[in-house]
Image (spheres, helix red, strand yellow):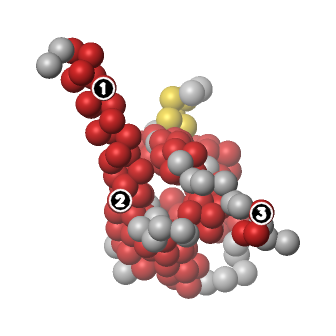
Amino acid sequence: MGIRDIDASLINFFRRVSVPLARFGLFVIFFWFGLLKVVEASPASGLVQRLFEETVPFVGFSTFLFFFGALEVVIGILFLVRGAERVVIPLLLLHMATTFLPLIMLPGESWSGFLVPTLEGQYIIKNLALIAVAVGIAANLQPLRKEEEVV
Protein backbone atom coordinates (compact mmCIF):
# COMPACT_ATOMS: atom_id res chain seq x y z
CA MET A 1 0.00 0.00 0.00
CA GLY A 2 1.55 3.27 -1.15
CA ILE A 3 1.28 6.76 0.30
CA ARG A 4 -1.46 7.67 -2.20
CA ASP A 5 -3.56 4.68 -1.09
CA ILE A 6 -3.08 5.60 2.57
CA ASP A 7 -3.97 9.21 1.78
CA ALA A 8 -7.14 8.16 -0.08
CA SER A 9 -8.13 5.76 2.71
CA LEU A 10 -7.70 8.44 5.36
CA ILE A 11 -9.67 10.99 3.36
CA ASN A 12 -12.50 8.51 2.80
CA PHE A 13 -12.51 7.63 6.50
CA PHE A 14 -12.68 11.30 7.50
CA ARG A 15 -15.50 11.89 5.01
CA ARG A 16 -17.49 9.07 6.60
CA VAL A 17 -17.00 10.21 10.20
CA SER A 18 -16.85 14.00 9.84
CA VAL A 19 -20.57 14.77 10.07
CA PRO A 20 -21.37 12.29 12.87
CA LEU A 21 -18.32 13.52 14.79
CA ALA A 22 -19.32 17.15 14.23
CA ARG A 23 -22.87 16.45 15.40
CA PHE A 24 -21.62 14.68 18.52
CA GLY A 25 -19.11 17.43 19.30
CA LEU A 26 -21.76 20.14 19.03
CA PHE A 27 -24.12 18.04 21.16
CA VAL A 28 -21.52 17.68 23.93
CA ILE A 29 -20.62 21.38 23.97
CA PHE A 30 -24.15 22.75 23.88
CA PHE A 31 -25.74 20.15 26.14
CA TRP A 32 -22.98 20.31 28.77
CA PHE A 33 -22.55 24.08 28.85
CA GLY A 34 -26.32 24.61 28.74
CA LEU A 35 -26.88 22.18 31.59
CA LEU A 36 -24.30 24.05 33.66
CA LYS A 37 -26.34 27.23 33.16
CA VAL A 38 -29.62 25.48 34.04
CA VAL A 39 -28.19 24.22 37.34
CA GLU A 40 -26.47 27.59 37.96
CA ALA A 41 -22.95 26.13 37.91
CA SER A 42 -21.62 27.78 34.76
CA PRO A 43 -18.35 29.71 35.00
CA ALA A 44 -19.75 31.95 32.25
CA SER A 45 -22.68 33.10 34.43
CA GLY A 46 -20.94 36.29 35.52
CA LEU A 47 -20.32 37.44 31.97
CA VAL A 48 -23.83 36.40 30.93
CA GLN A 49 -25.27 38.37 33.86
CA ARG A 50 -23.33 41.53 32.98
CA LEU A 51 -24.50 41.29 29.38
CA PHE A 52 -28.02 40.55 30.59
CA GLU A 53 -28.02 43.73 32.69
CA GLU A 54 -27.11 45.72 29.57
CA THR A 55 -29.72 44.15 27.29
CA VAL A 56 -32.64 42.32 28.94
CA PRO A 57 -33.55 44.05 32.20
CA PHE A 58 -37.27 43.15 31.98
CA VAL A 59 -36.84 39.49 33.07
CA GLY A 60 -35.23 38.12 36.22
CA PHE A 61 -31.69 36.90 35.63
CA SER A 62 -32.17 33.42 37.09
CA THR A 63 -35.20 32.91 34.80
CA PHE A 64 -33.24 34.18 31.80
CA LEU A 65 -30.23 31.99 32.62
CA PHE A 66 -32.45 28.92 32.97
CA PHE A 67 -34.09 29.47 29.58
CA PHE A 68 -30.80 30.44 27.91
CA GLY A 69 -29.25 27.24 29.24
CA ALA A 70 -32.31 25.21 28.26
CA LEU A 71 -32.00 26.59 24.72
CA GLU A 72 -28.39 25.39 24.63
CA VAL A 73 -29.47 21.94 25.88
CA VAL A 74 -32.14 21.77 23.14
CA ILE A 75 -29.62 22.86 20.50
CA GLY A 76 -27.29 20.12 21.67
CA ILE A 77 -29.98 17.44 21.57
CA LEU A 78 -31.22 18.55 18.15
CA PHE A 79 -27.76 18.08 16.69
CA LEU A 80 -28.17 14.37 17.42
CA VAL A 81 -31.47 14.19 15.54
CA ARG A 82 -31.10 13.51 11.83
CA GLY A 83 -33.47 15.74 9.92
CA ALA A 84 -33.46 18.52 12.54
CA GLU A 85 -30.59 20.40 10.89
CA ARG A 86 -32.83 22.99 9.22
CA VAL A 87 -34.21 23.88 12.65
CA VAL A 88 -31.09 23.62 14.81
CA ILE A 89 -28.61 25.46 12.60
CA PRO A 90 -30.67 28.70 12.55
CA LEU A 91 -31.09 28.33 16.34
CA LEU A 92 -27.33 27.95 16.68
CA LEU A 93 -26.68 31.02 14.52
CA LEU A 94 -29.17 33.08 16.55
CA HIS A 95 -27.53 31.88 19.75
CA MET A 96 -24.07 32.66 18.38
CA ALA A 97 -25.14 36.21 17.51
CA THR A 98 -25.98 36.75 21.18
CA THR A 99 -22.73 35.20 22.37
CA PHE A 100 -20.67 37.66 20.33
CA LEU A 101 -22.37 40.68 21.95
CA PRO A 102 -19.88 40.97 24.85
CA LEU A 103 -17.10 41.68 22.35
CA ILE A 104 -18.97 44.89 21.50
CA MET A 105 -21.06 45.67 24.58
CA LEU A 106 -18.57 44.64 27.28
CA PRO A 107 -15.21 45.56 25.75
CA GLY A 108 -13.55 45.95 29.15
CA GLU A 109 -14.22 42.30 29.90
CA SER A 110 -13.57 40.98 26.40
CA TRP A 111 -10.40 42.81 25.42
CA SER A 112 -7.21 43.58 27.32
CA GLY A 113 -5.85 45.67 24.44
CA PHE A 114 -6.30 46.30 20.74
CA LEU A 115 -7.03 42.88 19.18
CA VAL A 116 -5.87 41.19 22.40
CA PRO A 117 -8.81 39.26 23.84
CA THR A 118 -9.13 38.39 27.49
CA LEU A 119 -9.74 34.76 28.40
CA GLU A 120 -13.47 35.50 28.14
CA GLY A 121 -12.90 37.11 24.73
CA GLN A 122 -11.01 34.05 23.54
CA TYR A 123 -13.85 31.86 24.78
CA ILE A 124 -16.27 33.91 22.67
CA ILE A 125 -14.08 34.08 19.56
CA LYS A 126 -13.64 30.29 19.52
CA ASN A 127 -17.34 30.14 18.73
CA LEU A 128 -16.31 30.83 15.14
CA ALA A 129 -15.14 27.20 15.08
CA LEU A 130 -18.58 26.04 16.26
CA ILE A 131 -20.18 28.04 13.45
CA ALA A 132 -17.77 26.49 10.95
CA VAL A 133 -18.66 23.00 12.19
CA ALA A 134 -22.39 23.76 11.82
CA VAL A 135 -21.78 25.12 8.31
CA GLY A 136 -19.95 21.87 7.50
CA ILE A 137 -22.98 19.89 8.63
CA ALA A 138 -25.27 22.11 6.55
CA ALA A 139 -23.01 21.69 3.51
CA ASN A 140 -23.63 17.94 3.66
CA LEU A 141 -27.43 18.22 3.60
CA GLN A 142 -29.43 17.28 0.53
CA PRO A 143 -31.36 20.19 -1.00
CA LEU A 144 -35.10 20.11 -0.44
CA ARG A 145 -37.07 18.55 -3.26
CA LYS A 146 -39.87 20.54 -4.86
CA GLU A 147 -42.60 18.80 -2.82
CA GLU A 148 -40.74 19.49 0.45
CA GLU A 149 -40.50 23.26 0.03
CA VAL A 150 -42.02 25.29 2.81
CA VAL A 151 -44.50 27.88 1.61
Of tags 3 and 2, the one toward the viewer is 3
**The quadrant where residue 6 appears:** top left
- In this rendered view, identify the residue nearer to me: 18 or 54: 18
Residue 24 is tagged as 2
Q: Residues within 10 Å of mark 3 (few under 14, many from 20)?
A: few
**Residue drawn at the location 41% of the way across and 50% of the way down:** 19
**Residue drawn at the location 24% of the way across and 21% of the way down:** 5
User: Which numbered disc, 3 or 2, marks the residue that appears first in the sequence?
Assistant: 2
**Residue drawn at the location 54% of the way across and 37% of the way down:** 111
Tell which residue pokes out farthest to the left in this image: 1
**Residue drawn at the location 60% of the way across and 54% of the way down:** 142
Q: Residues within 10 Å of mark 2 (few under 14, many from 20)?
A: some
Residue 37 is tagged as none
User: Which numbered disc, 3 or 1, marks the residue that appears first in the sequence?
Assistant: 1
Report the amino acid beneath label 3.
Lys
Q: Residues within 10 Å of mark 1 (few under 14, many from 20)?
A: few
Tell me the CA gap for discs 3 and 1.
Answer: 35 Å
Q: Disc 3 marks which residue?
A: 146
Q: Disc 1 marks which residue?
A: 8
Label 3 sits on a secondary structure element that is helix
Establish if 137 lies above or below 47. above
Tell me the CA gap for discs 3 and 2.
Answer: 30 Å
Instruction: Answer left or right for 34 relative to 49.
Output: left
Q: Position of residue 96 (x, y in %)?
A: 59, 55
Residue 65: in sight, yes or no? no
Label 1 sits on a secondary structure element that is helix
Q: Position of residue 49 (x, y in %)?
A: 55, 67
Tell me the CA gap for discs 1 and 2.
Answer: 24 Å
Of tags 1 and 2, the one toward the viewer is 1
Instruction: Answer left or right for 103 relative to 74.
Output: right
